Structure formats: structure tokens, C-alpha cells
Image (cartoon, rainbow, N blue to C red):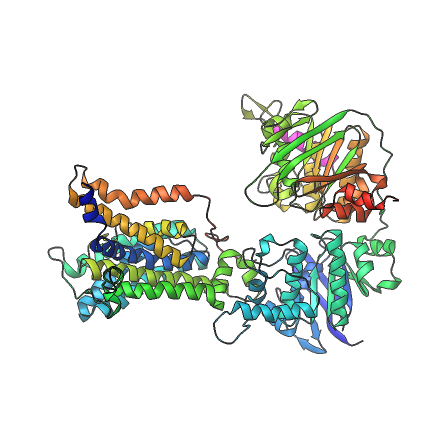
């Protein structure tokens, strides 16, 4: 039994799968962190990822290029985010309500668009990303195959996470974003444009959520399926809190959740007598446990969720 | 002296209120110019106009001799006008450096090299002799230092004229001294300051000239050396003011009404904790509890009112053990509580006057019967109190949020004092009130004491403590630093205890060796 365990879990394949499952969470977390550091909760992440998945698939369908598909996915996510920004920044609507409405709306909208364009009989398989081992780096024993023999989207994620981290903490713009999430009135008083910064934060978040969505349609299934993001947007919300709003920590936490997903899939394959639904529920249960354990112990941006209205 | 700023004939009308009516203000190079007036006199409006936050309806502004139309805070900053708001505009989780550079471009390009910027700012701080801890988050800095961060922030943006809005309101006496030193220093280096205040003492100490506003008009500009305290007070209020509170001598009764015995309350964050606090208030006396805000006063208040259960210790009010009782059980005793924040703790602003007056007794007879409110009884009760306590309102259906601070205060006094409480707990009750309302509040509190109530007066306003108390205790970091009789207290002694020196340590060295 023990050897079976080691055979299944302590393998290059298992860790490689963990990374593959973790990266969409990591890149979406980076986006959510920008948004929340700027004071806007974006629970519409799920919808933005889904829009990204469909956008990516359609872009690739028409151009036969997964890279163009990726760009379309990014834009689709940004578009949904722009609606959220308009609702919560310009109209000062409740951020949770707006996000929830977008999730439901996008689920319906993407299903509708997909069926209207492609019908319900067949699913087109589109040009997608293949694994591309990075020269030299992929040769590193153990680490190489796990981190550097992935699809290009994974490498894009590495860069994005590093970039977001640098931009947030090492630039004046990042300082501005943080200030509008902590104390927008103070930011306003020194001449920063609170609304503009918050728009940028939310739309950037949409771009990265859209990018995360393309993992599913261009990296895993090569087509679009209704609701294919499967609630991972909500897992990301938990990842962000567990990571205490740090992009690099979020990538590590995402790995934990990615591993949980990989464990779930393998438990399912093992057929050890528990219904496979339990195995698949594993990442979500983990989310709840971790979330409950950390409640009230993290440092949330001070003005998170609060609209800023000038007097 | 050259004129730096002239505001001429400034008029600003809000719906229903003339906030500024032809106001003139002139500030010359290198002077400290005090702007004196009560709440609502138009000081804030005038400064908002100067800082570009609102446009005047009439009048013009001359800056260094040239007519300017100040379009916004950014424009004001670019001209060289810096504002230190009463409520600091600092991000609590940023360091001083991050706050100072926010919204500026301290270096070329988008990058933020904190080490380098810190050096640059440190140099500026040294030039003006501003002592600041640059690496700690603002939320962990004392208020005096936060204010210095604000001053440096303005100077970093090239402020030539510094507007300070009620800068001493949050400071300890020692910090006020430091601030005055800083202002003198700024003056020496050619900066001008507008010092907004309603505290005569400070205006007389620190300013070169003083302009007095009343009801939106400017009533006078005087050279401070030629001004007197009663004279300024009369200009400010519009009638002669009794500056000293008339107080009858205390008559000791020996009967304890509030007994706080070794209370401990620890919290995960902040300094609002209690480490073994013991106090006794006797009937017929006022015990003043002085201290800088945030040193356990709120925790103590919560324990006294039944909002928080202490970890250890016991509180007895009017011979009843109230430790761990609910607020309603405490309220049912003959206790009056005047809380520190009128609009969040004392009243429910969106509700009407009668609803607010009924808050503590609505659930029992005669205000309700069988669990149903009796509006007629309550309205009658409310009308009686409104008249008795002189609350200015057309009727009792008016929402509390539309009343002035002074009238809100009267409502609280009415609700808390009408049943003639034998124990009275007062916390920072006069904050934000003007002289008239403060006078009224003091009279009512003293009246209760003269009729035999024991009063616990929690206040961060040293003036208030010295003027009302019979005995004074000082709290710092959740501990009592010492207790003294009011007639033996002097300002510097209490001030030292407020910053954490124990009474024994003060008295010790003074003894002849």
C-alpha cells in the first residue's frame, strides 16, 4: 500500500500536474490581489475566467493561433471587468452583488454565445498550446520536468506573478494602488485619481482572470464547455486571503490547491472504494478548512469593499 | 513685511447658510497667523476655499501679489500651500516615507527606490529639526509624530504657507510644546503658517497676528502682542464670556458610588488595554481621569457600561456588582453615561429625537405596555425634556442627524441626567463643541455633583480635567500613573504622567535630599 502511495504521489508526473493545475489559480490570484489591494473585491473572477476561456477558444478557432486566442481571452476577461468597474466605481454599487450578478450573467452569456455560434451537436477542437520544454532549464533533474516542461501559458504565469509583485511593491503606481485600497481619501488629498486607479486595478484583474481562463480552453480541453472553470474563481478568492495579499505567496498557496486537485484526480483513479465525487471535492473542502483556520488573522486592505464617494 | 497671501471679500453661500460673508485675510511672509473662531464661524470654509476644495461665490485671492483662481488641492500644492488636516490624511499601514512621497514623483521613471528616497527625506527632516521614525508604519506612531509626518509631507511638496487645522486637538502638552518649537523654526526659515484654533491660550502663545471670525464675518485682525484673552474671547463669541467655571468646594461624603477594583483587560492589538486599574469615585466629587486617547480609556468605558467583560477584577456601581452584566442591566441602575462619541455611541442619528430619548427605557412601563410602544407617552416625555434642556428644534419628530453638535449633546444630557443619576460617567463629552455648549455641559455636570452624584470624568483634554475635577487620576498604557488632588495638580506634572512617568518618579527627585 505504502509503495502504491509513493508510486502515485511522489512522482514527477504528480508534481508536474500540480503545477499545471496551480498556474491558472496563481495568475488569477495575481489579478485579484491587484484589484483588492486597490480596494475592490472582485468575486466576479469566476465569470471573467469563463469569459476568458470562451474568448480564448474563439480567438484560436478563427485564427488558428493559440497565442491570438490567449490575447482574445485576456481581452474578454478585461471586458467583463470593465463592467464591474463601472458598476462599483462609477455607480458605487455593492461590490459583492455586482460580482455575483456578473458570475451568473457570464455563465449564461458564454453558454448562449457558444451554442449560437457552434450549435449543440459538435464541439470544435481548436489550435491549442502544447508542452514546450525550456531549453537547458528543463534538463535540471527533477525540477526541470516539473517546472520547465509545461505549456507556454505556465511560463507566462511565472513572468506575470513576478511582474505583478514588482509593480505593486516597487513602483509609484503600485504605491498609488495600495493607497486607494487603504485610505482613498488620503490618496485623493495628495492629488491621486482614486477612480482612475481603481478602474485600472479592476480591469488589470480582468485581463489576468481572462488569461487564467485560457488555461482551460487552450491548455487542457482544447474547446469550450459550459461552466468549465468549475468554481476555481472562488478558490482564488480563498488563495488571496491565505496568501495575505502577496502575489508570490499566492503562487505558493496556489500550488497547494493545485496539488489538492491532482490528489483528487488520482484518488479517483485509484478506485479505493470511496465515491469519486468525494475525491473531486477535495480542493474545495481544503479551501473551506484553510479559510476557516485563517479567518480574522490576515491583514485585509483597509478600504476593501468600500466605495469612495467624494464629499 | 511683504504680503504672501491676501483673501479679499470672500463670500461663500451654501443652501440656507452664509458660510463666509465678505471675509478678508492677509498673511505676510514668515508670520504665524492665527485664525480664531468657534465651530461654524467659517474657518473651515475659508480654508477649503484657499486649498481649492471649494470655489468662492465672490471675492478674490492674491498669492504673492498675483490674482489666482485655485482650482483644486493639487493646484494649491503647486502654488506652495500645504494643508495639515485635523484628521490626518495618512495611510495607516504605510511608513512615513511612503506617505510623504505618495502622489509625487520623487525620482525619474516609475520605479520606487525607498532607500534613496528615505535619504532625501531624512535630509529635509534634519533641516527643519523634525524628529520622525521613517521605517515604522504610521498606525504605530504617536499622534505628535504623525503630525510631524504631515508637516514634512507638505514641506516635501514645497509648501511655503502651511495651514494647520486645529493642530493641538490631539496632542499631549509636551507634544504641543514641540509643535510650537517647530512652528518657530519654520518661521525662521521663511515659511508662513495659518494656525486655526479655538483655544485662546495657544493662539496667544504662538501667533504673531490673529484674525477672528464669527458667524461667517471677520470681526477683527489684531497683533497678538496687543490682544488679551478676555478681549479675544468676547470677539469670538460676541458677548463677554466667563472663562473660569464657578465651582463650589467639594464636600466629602465617604460614600463610594463607583468602585473599580483591579481590572485587567487584554486585547490582541493596540494599546487600549487595562493592566490592573483601580479607581474609586465618591458621592459628591468629580474624579478626572486624564490620559492621551487610546491608553485604555475606551476599554475602561466598555467595562463600566457592560459592553466588555474584563479578564480579571471587579466593578461595583452603586453597591451593585456590574462585572459582566449586560449594558441594559447597568443602565437600569441609577447611572448616567455620557459617551465620547455623540454620533456613534451616544445617539442613533438617523432616528428621531423622541426615539433617541426613549432608548434606555422604551422597553418598560410607562413607555411601552405588553411589548407595544406608547408613542403618546414617549412624545410627551420627549417634549418635556427638549424644553427643559433647551434643545433647539421645531419638534421632536426631527432626525437627530440634522441637529447641531451642541443640540445633540443636550439631548444626551437630557436622556442621561433627567432621572437624577447618583453615578455619572462622562467621556470626552465636549469634544467638537463650541464654547457655549461646553459651558452648558460643564454646568450640568457640576450641578449633578453638587446634588451628591459621583462623577467619573474621562477626558484627554487637560484643560477640562483641571477645570472640573476634584481629584485627578492619570492613565497611561492601561495603568494608573498616579492620583492627586486637583488643587495640588499642575499642568506639567499631569502632562508627564500622561506620557508615562509615575507620580512617585516625579515627586521623588523633588524632595530635598
Q: In percent of the image, x 76 and y 52: which residue is there?
A: B173
Q: In percent of the image, x 52 and y 66: which residue is there?
A: A192
Extreme residue in the top direction: B370
Query: Is any part of residue A16 visible from this angle?
Result: yes
Q: In the shown orientation, is residue B108 left or right of residue A72?
A: right
Range drawn in magenta? B376-389
Judge whether B509 appears above or below A218 on screen: above
Q: Position of residue A48 (x, y in %)?
A: 31, 57
Is residue B477 or residue A194 the one in the foreground? B477
Q: Position of residue B40 (x, y in %)?
A: 71, 54
Q: In the shown orientation, is residue A210 left or right of residue B393?
A: left
> Does the magenta segment cover residue B385?
yes
Q: Main secondary structure of the magenta part?
A: helix
Q: How many marks?
A: 0
Extreme residue in the bottom direction: B66
Quadrant placement of the C terminus of chain A: bottom right
Query: Is any part of residue B217 visible from this angle?
Result: no
> Does the magenta segment cover residue B124?
no
Q: In the shown orientation, is residue A42 left or right of residue B192?
A: left
Q: Position of residue A296 (x, y in %)?
A: 46, 44
Is residue A235 or residue A9 the one in the foreground? A9
Is residue B500 or residue B289 the one in the foreground? B500
The answer to which quarter of the image holds residue A295 is top left
The answer to which quarter of the image holds residue B423 is top right
Q: Position of residue A170 (x, y in %)?
A: 47, 66
Extreme residue in the left direction: A121
Is residue B49 or residue A43 the one in the foreground? A43
Q: In the shown orientation, is residue B500 left or right of residue B252?
A: left
Judge whether B189 appears above or below A184 on screen: below
Quadrant placement of the N terminus of chain A: top left
Amino acid at each position: 500500500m505504502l509503495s502504491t502511495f509513493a508510486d502515485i504521489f511522489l512522482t514527477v508526473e504528480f508534481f508536474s500536474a500540480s503545477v499545471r493545475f496551480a498556474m491558472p489559480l496563481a495568475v488569477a490570484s495575481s489579478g485579484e490581489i491587484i484589484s483588492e489591494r486597490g480596494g475592490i473585491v472582485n468575486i466576479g473572477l469566476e465569470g471573467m475566467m469563463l469569459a476568458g476561456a470562451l474568448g480564448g477558444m474563439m480567438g484560436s478557432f478563427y485564427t488558428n493561433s493559440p497565442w491570438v486566442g490567449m490575447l482574445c481571452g485576456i481581452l474578454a476577461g478585461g471586458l467583463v471587468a470593465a463592467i464591474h468597474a463601472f458598476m462599483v466605481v462609477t455607480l458605487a454599487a455593492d461590490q459583492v452583488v455586482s460580482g455575483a450578478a456578473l458570475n451568473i450573467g457570464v455563465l449564461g452569456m458564454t453558454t448562449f454565445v457558444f451554442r449560437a455560434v457552434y450549435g449543440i451537436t459538435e464541439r470544435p477542437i481548436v489550435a491549442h498550446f502544447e508542452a514546450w520544454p525550456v531549453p537547458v532549464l528543463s534538463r535540471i533533474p527533477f525540477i526541470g520536468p516539473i517546472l520547465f516542461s509545461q505549456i507556454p501559458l505556465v511560463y507566462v504565469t511565472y513572468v506575470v506573478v513576478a511582474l505583478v509583485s514588482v509593480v505593486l511593491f516597487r513602483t509609484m503606481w503600485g504605491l498609488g494602488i495600495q493607497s486607494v485600497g487603504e485610505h482613498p481619501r488620503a490618496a485623493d488629498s495628495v492629488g491621486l485619481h482614486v477612480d482612475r486607479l481603481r478602474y485600472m486595478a479592476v480591469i488589470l484583474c480582468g485581463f489576468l482572470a481572462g488569461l487564467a481562463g485560457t488555461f482551460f480552453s487552450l491548455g487542457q480541453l482544447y474547446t469550450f464547455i459550459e461552466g468549465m472553470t468549475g468554481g476555481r474563481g472562488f478558490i482564488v478568492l480563498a488563495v488571496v486571503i491565505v496568501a495575505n495579499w502577496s502575489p508570490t505567496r499566492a503562487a505558493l498557496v496556489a500550488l497547494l490547491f493545485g496539488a489538492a486537485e491532482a490528489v483528487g484526480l488520482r484518488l479517483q483513479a485509484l478506485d479505493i472504494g470511496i465515491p469519486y465525487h468525494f475525491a473531486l471535492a477535495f480542493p474545495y473542502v481544503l479551501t473551506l478548512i484553510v479559510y476557516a483556520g485563517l479567518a480574522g488573522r490576515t491583514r485585509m486592505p483597509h478600504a476593501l469593499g468600500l466605495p469612495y464617494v467624494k464629499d | 513685511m511683504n504680503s504672501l497671501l491676501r483673501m479679499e471679500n470672500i463670500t461663500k453661500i451654501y443652501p440656507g447658510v452664509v458660510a463666509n460673508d465678505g471675509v478678508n485675510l492677509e498673511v505676510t511672509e514668515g508670520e504665524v497667523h492665527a485664525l480664531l473662531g468657534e465651530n461654524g464661524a467659517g474657518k473651515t470654509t475659508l480654508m477649503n476655499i484657499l486649498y481649492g476644495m471649494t470655489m468662492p461665490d465672490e471675492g478674490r485671492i492674491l498669492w504673492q501679489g498675483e490674482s489666482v483662481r485655485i482650482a483644486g488641492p493639487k493646484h494649491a500644492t503647486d502654488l506652495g500651500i500645504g494643508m495639515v488636516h485635523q484628521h490626518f490624511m495618512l495611510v495607516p499601514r504605510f511608513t512615513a516615507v511612503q506617505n510623504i512621497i505618495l502622489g509625487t514623483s520623487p525620482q525619474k521613471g516609475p520605479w520606487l527606490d525607498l532607500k534613496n528616497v528615505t535619504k532625501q527625506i531624512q535630509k529635509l527632516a534634519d533641516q527643519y529639526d523634525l524628529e520622525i521614525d521613517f521605517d515604522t508604519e504610521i498606525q504605530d506612531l504617536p499622534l505628535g509624530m504623525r503630525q510631524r509626518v504631515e508637516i514634512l509631507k507638505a514641506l516635501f511638496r514645497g509648501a511655503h504657507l502651511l495651514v494647520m487645522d486645529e493642530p493641538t486637538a490631539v496632542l499631549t502638552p509636551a507634544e504641543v510644546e514641540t509643535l510650537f518649537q517647530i512652528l518657530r523654526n519654520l518661521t525662521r526659515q521663511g515659511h508662513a503658517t495659518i494656525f486655526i484654533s479655538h483655544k485662546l491660550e495657544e493662539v496667544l502663545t504662538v501667533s504673531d497676528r490673529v484674525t477672528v471670525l464669527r458667524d461667517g464675518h471677520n470681526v477683527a485682525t489684531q497683533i497678538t502682542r496687543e490682544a488679551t484673552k478676555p478681549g479675544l474671547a468676547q470677539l469670538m463669541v460676541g458677548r463677554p464670556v466667563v472663562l473660569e467655571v464657578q465651582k463650589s468646594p467639594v464636600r466629602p461624603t465617604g460614600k463610594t458610588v463607583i468602585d473599580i477594583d483591579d481590572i485587567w483587560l487584554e486585547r490582541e492589538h493596540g494599546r487600549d488595554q487595562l493592566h490592573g486599574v483601580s479607581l474609586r469615585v465618591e458621592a459628591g466629587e468629580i474624579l478626572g481621569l486624564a490620559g492621551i486617547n487610546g491608553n485604555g480609556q475606551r476599554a475602561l468605558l466598555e467595562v463600566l457600561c457592560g459592553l466588555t467583560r474584563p479578564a480579571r477584577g471587579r466593578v461595583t456601581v452603586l453597591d451593585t456588582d456590574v462585572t459582566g452584566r449586560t449594558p441594559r442591566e447597568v443602565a437600569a441602575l441609577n447611572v448616567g453615561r455620557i459617551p465620547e462619541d455623540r454620533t456613534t455611541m451616544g445617539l442613533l442619528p438617523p432616528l428621531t429625537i423622541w426615539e433617541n430619548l426613549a432608548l434606555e427605557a422604551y422597553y418598560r412601563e410607562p413607555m411601552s405596555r405588553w411589548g407595544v410602544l406608547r408613542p403618546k407617552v414617549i412624545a410627551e416625555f420627549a417634549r418635556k425634556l427638549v424644553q427643559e434642556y433647551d434643545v433647539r428644534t421645531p419638534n421632536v419628530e426631527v432626525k437627530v442627524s440634522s441637529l447641531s453638535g451642541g443640540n445633540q449633546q443636550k439631548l444626551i444630557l437630557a436622556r442621561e441626567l433627567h432621572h437624577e443619576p447618583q453615578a455619572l460617567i462622562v467621556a470626552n463629552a465636549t469634544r467638537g463643541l463650541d464654547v457655549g455648549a461646553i459651558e452648558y455641559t460643564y454646568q450640568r455636570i457640576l450641578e449633578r455633583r453638587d446634588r451628591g452624584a459621583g462623577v467619573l470624568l474621562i477626558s484627554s483634554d487637560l484643560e477640562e480635567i483641571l477645570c472640573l475635577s476634584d481629584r485627578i487620576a492619570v492613565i497611561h498604557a492601561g495603568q494608573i500613573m498616579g492620583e492627586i488632588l486637583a488643587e495640588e495638580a499642575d499642568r506639567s506634572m499631569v502632562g508627564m504622567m500622561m506620557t508615562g512617568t509615575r507620580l512617585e518618579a516625579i515627586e521623588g527627585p523633588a524632595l530635598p535630599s
